[in-house]
Amino acid sequence: MNDVINPKPDIEANTMDKHRSEFDVEINGTVGKPFVDNAKMSSRNCDVFYGDKQAIFGIDLDIGNNEIIALIGPSGCGKSTYLRVLNRMNDTIQICRVTGEHTLDGEDIYGKKTDPVLLRARVGMVFQKPNPFPKSIYDNVAYGARLHGLASNRAELDDLVEASLIKAGLFKEVKDDLLKPGTGLSGGQQQRLCIARAIAVDPEVILMDEPTSALDPIATAIIEELMDELKSNYTIAIVTHSMQQAARVSQRTAYFHMGKLVEVNDTDKVFTNPEHKLTENYITGRFG
Ligand SMILES: Nc1ncnc2c1ncn2[C@@H]1O[C@H](COP(=O)(O)OP(=O)(O)OP(=O)(O)O)[C@@H](O)[C@H]1O
Ligand SMILES: [Mg+2]
């Protein structure tokens, strides 16, 4: 009967089994080194739900002080969702619910005493698409400093804007155009402007969600160099779909798969000798 309906059941079953054996490897906790001695941020038992749908399952992870950690994995595996846990950006999504313990320098970032606006100054964010405000270059960088009262007079604000643009590697290119609109810059310049805006409020952690995916290779190289300089003062978590980028910029790499954290290891190890089969499948291009 079956044979009539489906003339090739065995072949299909075999294909399915092969598929299963390669990709449906069980995920029992995280292998490798998810914990560090000098954690700047930590998550324990992190679950995230959008309505009834669970997007993140029981993640335990430390992000070390002054390290760059790369978050990689197939589309929809929860990288952006997890990044937004770290500065409570998920609070702005009504149906989103985050559980678990999350700390910055050991302090509970979801505690009653934590003001999410102040938290986001300490844990800044740079998005995939450069999103300068429709304001001048100067005002873009000065925005957060004004909001948080970081400069007491115009001269101090001028200095802060200049210092932030220098750190973001943009000052030389825009120093004569500070009053021109930020939106008039090239994509790569706009992204450095957004980095300057994040830096201006003196954050401790910078979260970057695919910060170079809309940029050409030259603009990408400039941002990557910049990240290398920034890591002496900041802790950085970067989501990237480029494994070359993860390998170039990060010290540790975290591999996410269907909402779970499969493996965290030194970046060299992840790309040369991954511990988990799923990581290997992903980095060798067999998944995602
Ligand atoms: N605002 C939202 N509302 C409902 N579901 C969401 C929302 N944002 C993300 N999700 C769901 O959560 C899961 C994880 O999504 P997320 O955007 O974190 O993945 P990602 O790893 O960043 O993917 P990509 O590489 O495509 O950016 C997906 O199933 C996605 O559909
Ligand atoms: Mg994403």
Image: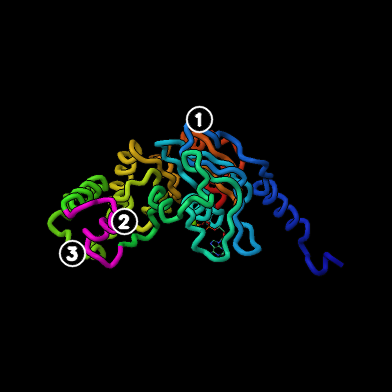
Q: Which residue is mark 3?
A: 180
Give residue 214's quadrant in the image.
bottom left
Q: Is residue 144 one of those drawn in magenta?
A: yes
Mark 1 and mark 2: Cα distance apart in space: 32 Å
Number of dots carrying numbers? 3
Question: Which residue reaches farthest bottom?
Answer: 5
Residue 102 in percent (x, y) is at 54, 45
Badge number at residue 37: 1
Helix, strand or loop under label 1 = loop
Compare residues 142 and 68 and report the one nearer the observer: 142
Residue 67 in percent (x, y) is at 42, 37
Who's the residue at 78% across and 56% down the image? 10
227 vs 11, left or right, is left
258 vs 108, left or right, is right
Specify the quarter for ligand 1: bottom right
Residue 220 in sight in this render: no
Identified by mark 3, the residue type is Lys
Helix, strand or loop under label 2 = helix
Compare residues 24 and 285 and report the one nearer the observer: 24
Of labels 1 and 2, the one closer to you: 2
Of labels 2 and 3, the one closer to you: 2
Who's the residue at 17% across and 55% down the image? 154
Identify the magenta region. Answer: 133-154
Badge number at residue 144: 2
Who's the residue at 34% across and 62% down the image? 131
Of marks 1 and 2, which one's residue comes earlier in the chain?
1
Q: Residues within 10 Å of mark 2 (few under 14, many from 20)?
A: some
